[in-house]
Every structure is written in C-alpha cells, then in structure tokens.
Amino acid sequence: MFSAKCKSKARLEGRTAIVTGSNTGIGYETARELLKRGARVILANRDLEKSQKAGEMLCAEVPACQLRLLRLDLASLKSVHTFAMEILATESNVHLLINNAGVFACPYTLTEDGNEMQFQTNHLGHFLLTLLLLPALKVSAPSRIINVSSKLHWFGKIDFDDMEMSKTYKPTKAYSRSKLCNMLFTKELIKRLQGTGVVAYTVDPGMVATEATRHLKGTAASMQKKMEFLKKSPVQGAQTTLHCALSEKLAVQKGMHYSECSSAAISCGAKRKEDAMKLWKLSEDLLLCQVGSAACVIRRNLFYPQIIQERMGLFRNGSCTSDAKLDGKTVVITGANSGIGFETARELAKRGARVVMANRNMELSKRAAEKIRSEVPYAQVNVVQLNLASLKSVESCADEILRTESQINILINNAGVFMCPFMLTEDDLETQFQTNHLGHFLLTLLLLPRIESSAPARIINVSSSGYKCKLLIYQIRKKNF
C-alpha cells in the first residue's frame, strides 16, 4: 500500500511531547521518532505495565532517550484530570500534544462517567485533556496539537439528542461519530486559538495494521483479515502525524486536515461551524457535570458553557505592559517550580529582582532555579522549602526567609492544589482549604512585619475565575469544618 513519508529533518532538543495511546501501534512509532529527534516524550497510556515494556524497548533503541511514563485512562474523566494536574505541576513546557489514543468498534458500554465508550475515549477525554493542558501549551508556544481522526469521519453523524446511543448503537457507527467529533472539535479549537501561537491539526493515518480492530467479529472481522495486504505498517501510519508535528511549514496554521502528509478534503459534516460550536458547548456541559464527581457535586443549572467564555475569560489573553525594573527588590513566590509561578519568577529575575522560590519539592525547585540562571546569567535566585499542607513547614519557611532576607518587596502567593480527592493534612484540615488559603494566610502574617518595613510593597494572592460561578460544593464526609 502506498504511503507518504514525513520529510522534515527538524530536531526537537529541549522540546516536550505528550503522546496518548503510545505503548503500541501508531502512537508507539510516533513516540520513537520524536525520541530519535531529541524530544522529551511522555507516554500517556492506560496500562502502565504495557507502557513500561514499551518504554524499555524505546530506550534500548534510543539510548539517550528522555522518557516519562504516566497513566491516562480516557474512559475516566477523573484519570484525565489527575494526569493533566500532574503534567502542569511537574512539566515546565508542553510543545506537542498528540491525541492518538482511541478505541474502535467496541461493544456498547458506558464509561464510569455515564458516556458512550467510543464517544468519551475518542473525543471527550481528549477534549478535557486538551483544555486542561492549554495553559502549558500557550506558554510553550510555538506549540502544536494533533488529533488523530480517520477517513470514517465521512460516515459520521451526530444526533445531539441521543449522545448515549442507547437504542441506536452500532459499533462502527459510534466510531465514525467519534471521529467526526475529532474534526469538529479541532475546527472550533483552531478558531479559539488564533493569536496564541498554538496550532491544531487533524490527521487520517489511513488503514493501519494495529490492535485497534480487536473488537470486530463475524463478517466485519473476516473482511478485515482479507484486507490485511492493503494495510500500512504502524511506521507508515505514523508519518502524517509526524508531518503535522514536525513540518516547518505547519508551524503557523495552514489548513486543518492532513492525510498522506498532504492537506486533505473533509466531509460536509466536518465543515458545519454551527455543529462545531454545538459540540464544544455540549462537551463543556458534560464535563462540568461529571469531572471530579467523586470529590464534589457540580450543579448543572448553575454553570453553562457561555459562563466559561463570557464571565471566566477562557481563551482571553492580556499582557503586562509595564517596563518597570526591579533592581534591589526582593520577591517571594510560592509554587514557582513550574507553570505560572515559574514564568512569574523568570520575568521578575529578568527585571533585576532577587527571587526567592518557595516550593514543596526541593529537587524540582533547584532545577527551576538552574533553568532561570541559565537563561538570565545575572539572576539572583534562592530556593526554600515550603509545604503549605504543613503549618510547621510554613513556620520554618517564614523563619528562614526572615533570617536570610533583609527586605521583602513583593509576596506572590501562587501555589495551590486543584480538585484533589478528599484528604486531611497533617494538621487535620481539608487539603485544598489549607493549601490554597490557610497556609498562605499564615505565611503572609508571619512575613508581614518584614513586608511593612520594606514599603512600598505588594502582596498578590492568585485566585481563580471559578469563584464567580459558585459551582463546587465539596462533600466532606469525614470531617465538618
């Protein structure tokens, strides 16, 4: 079978890629090629044992590989959320998100979240993953999102009044619908990402010899066997994904859908802007009702998708326009080893400030400080340990800062934890309450005398637009507070 080949020679040193469904088939071959080009690759798979074996094979072939394995079960929105929070907490950058995982023509099943299996695994799980990782993708721009679709999207139809397909389910029909969802999701995503430096593409890998057809039975299975000679190898099937991930010409948005490493036609159904918007809103609504259901109850009638855009400001990007220099100033930033905190620390260091990074994980904190020093040779960066889930640690951190810093001109309370399972801290308080509020409350009070003596000074508390919606009602079963 004819197969085009990715011709890009791009190297990926210093770039981080996430590939879902990467312990076998197209995802495995995609990960292998990215590793060969110097990328740091995160394998995101449901079965960690198989992922471990895949990782060993990859590292045996690419000795200098930079590889990380994390569990991701797209049939569990809780798992998707946990995976994304781990990435945001530990990875400074995400340059490539390749949504490759999927299930094909499985028997009718509902996920633990109550969604039809192929719809959630192939679309909704990746939709949530992408939205949660967008902050990392944006700060890493130029970056790319690749959604693996299929030619079968041409046969897909969406009945927005019967998303569970409880009475009309046919395995291949549900698969085609999920692949059409990939197309419509990407279409709307491209529109919302304009001006961010993040581009998005869909790819059709073609008919590939993988384990995806394992659920087929009877006539369908027999036909697949007869067509084996027409199928591509996984290496060939990965070429269009690699083309969209690596081609220098696609660094800026150029079309949407690719097949055989070239721009390809899409179905009439995939062109419908109104369906793309409708699917996006439906997906948001489903997620807002289901994500974190083990930890909280989300009231559907209090939170509609437009609130995210119009009231919470999702996909809006402001920029600091101040040119102020901070020579001679001292800044304390909590949660500064990745994400917003790291970027804040880096910018303040560039402006001449002495930066104190207060983090729980000292190893990650030291790495972050070294990275800032490598980018800003004159940077003054100090690291101290701070575990906001321990009031004793907060006191120790404050004591060290007061002992070593003669002034504190800015305190940025940035650290936090988001929608974790129910846990009590060592101080017997609910984890999010203590980490996000009480720990910072104590730290601020302990540092306040030094901040006052350094006036003019500022205290910045990082909150969230979520407070506007009043949608999270935590069910704390073991303790009332």
Image: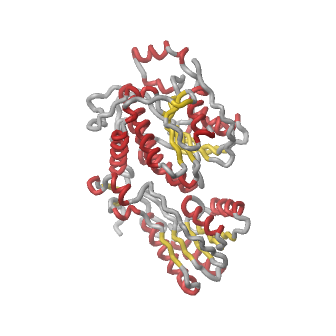
Front residue (pair 82, 314): 314
Q: Quadrant of residue 348?
A: bottom right
Residue 395 x, y percent position in the rendering: 55, 76
Q: Quadrant of residue 298?
A: bottom left
Which residue sits at x=56%, y=34%? Answer: 241
Which residue sits at x=53%, y=53%? Answer: 138
234 versus 31 height, above or below: above
Does residue 87 appear in the picture of this structure?
Answer: no
Does residue 259 appear in the picture of this structure?
Answer: yes
Which quadrant: the N terminus?
A: top right
85 versus 393 height, above or below: above
Residue 242 x, y percent position in the rendering: 60, 35
Residue 330 x, y percent position in the rendering: 62, 76
Which residue sits at x=34%, y=46%? Answer: 281
Q: Residue furthest bottom?
A: 453
Q: Quadrant of residue 379?
A: bottom right
Front residue (pair 362, 84): 84
96 versus 157 height, above or below: below
Front residue (pair 394, 266): 266
